[in-house]
Every structure is written in C-alpha cells, then in structure tokens.
Amino acid sequence: MATIDLNSDVGESFGRWTLGDDGAMLSIVTSANIACGFHAGDPSTLSETTRTAVAHGVSIGAQVSYRDLAGFGRRFVDASRRELTDDIVYQIGALQGIAAAAGGWVTYVKPHGALYNTSVRHQEHAAAVADAVAAIDPSLSVLGLPGSELLAAAERRGLRTVSEAFADRAYRPDGTLVPRTEAGAVLSDPGEVAERVARLVSDGVVRAVDGADVRVPAESVCVHGDSPGAVDMARAVRERLLADGVELAAFS
C-alpha cells in the first residue's frame, strides 16, 4: 500500500486579518506548515493553530521565511548567510516554544515563499536554512523541492530530507514551479487537483505546462492554505487518495 503525507500552510492570519480556514484544513491534512511570524502569524494565531494541530494529531512544521511581513514573504531579501541563519534559528525557536506550551513539538522545517523558491538554486541561502536547522535541532527534517540546493545542503549537514510535490501549483518542464506572477501558476479545480495528485502518487509524475510529464519523487504533497477553495481541494485530494487505497500519514 502506498503512503503519502498531506501538508498545508497554516497560521498565516495576523491580528484581525484572517487568511484561510485553519480549523477545517487541520482536520484534513497530516502535517501543518505553521508560520513563524516573519511572513505572517502573530503569537495568539500561532498558539491557537498549534493547539488545533495537536488536537487533530497533525505533525507540526516550522514554516520559516525571509523577514518580509509586508510582502507575505514572497519577496527576495538579500541577507547574508549569517543573517539568514540567525533569522531562521529565531523563527524555529519561537515556534518550538509555542508548540511546547500547546503540548506538541516541531518535527520539521519548510521554507516559505521566496525563501523556498530561492533555495532551489541559491547555494548560500539554502546553506543558511541547513545551518539553522543543524544548529538548533539536527533531529528536525527539512521539507523541500526534489533536486533543490536546499535538500542537497541539508543532506551535507546530515539532516533528514523529505521531498514534496504541490497539488495546486503548475510545474515547468524542469520540475520547478511556475512563478505566481504568471498566468495559470495556481490551480483551483478540486477534481483536476485530486486527479493530478492521484497520478503523482501512483506514477510519480505530474503534467508540466508544456504538456510533458515531469517525474517528481515525493513523500509529501502540499495544498496551499491560501489558495482559492483550499479546503475543498484538500478534501477532494484526501478522499480520492483514500478511495485509491493510499494511506495518509505524516512523514515525521
């Protein structure tokens, strides 16, 4: 029987500004990428999100970001390796404290937004993520794009790496994601997304924007919490995989 993890970005509300339906999403997924305050999330939001994840038995991950609250972490920040390492250590440590207070613990780290995409090719920023994880807790897994500099840097530091695919994002022929600034980058049809994930799990491929099949080895599949109809898509993916006999379980 095939096994796959479903993850989603949560805890991204801030004060009176609400983004996504975290309660519903955390009843569907098996891993939660919880914001750490640098791109979204305030302490009370993160505390509530973490408590909900613990209540549902969902694995907790620290979703670290560039220090870019105004831009939702989707803008590149030209930080030095040392500066970025310190920022990531700070974020992981904050979520570890909040998780402990909620009776849970952080098990993995995943970069968010621009940091995620930059660390696919940027060796210094990929190394900064790996440096931070190794420094604060080398038992943490690192979740990232297959073939990325991020996972290579983490492997060099002796960290466990986990490859992921994206249910609701379009792929380029080289296996990287189509930038959000381009048309068609984000998928929104629950049936299409569920079929796409089912094929990924069974055959290990996704259809790229040029029509070619791209091989994407993945232990985890992400459904973004802020995508249009995110909960409906996540539910459709879960139901389709269970119907196909796929076991849903956290990787950590």
Image (cartoon, rainbow, N blue to C red):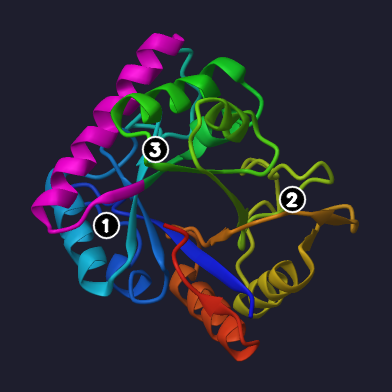
Q: Is residue 70 above or below residue 207?
A: above
Which residue bears the numbered disc 3?
A: 72
Q: Which mark is residue 18?
A: 1
Magenta stretch: give its range. Answer: 80-107
Q: Is residue 218 above or below residue 72?
A: below
Whole-Å distance between the Cαs marked 2 and 1?
29 Å
- Under mark 3, the amino acid is Phe
Q: Secondary structure at mark 3?
A: loop
Which residue bears the numbered disc 2?
A: 171
Whole-Å distance between the Cαs marked 1 and 3?
13 Å
- Residue reaching furthest to the left: 101
Q: Earlier in the sequence, mark 3 or mark 2?
A: 3
Q: Secondary structure at mark 1?
A: loop
Q: Position of residue 61 (x, y in %)?
A: 36, 49
Which mark is in front, 2 or 1?
Answer: 2
Q: Is residue 154 above or below residue 51?
A: above
Q: Which mark is residue 120?
A: none
- Under mark 1, the amino acid is Thr
Q: Position of residue 58 (x, y in %)?
A: 33, 66
Question: What residue is rendered at 62% in x and 30% in y?
Answer: 152
Q: Position of residue 5 (x, y in %)?
A: 51, 65
Q: Where is the C terminus found, in terms of image quarters?
A: bottom left
Please check the rendered image and state whether residue 84 is part of the magenta-colored stretch, yes or no. Answer: yes
Q: Quadrant of residue 71?
A: top left
Q: Quadrant of residue 104?
A: bottom left
Whole-Å distance between the Cαs marked 3 and 2?
22 Å
Question: What residue is rendered at 46% in x and 19% in y?
Answer: 77
Mark 1 in CB contact with mark 3 (< 8 angstroms): no
Q: Is residue 208 visible?
A: no
- Under mark 2, the amino acid is Tyr
Mark 3 in CB contact with mark 2 (< 8 angstroms): no
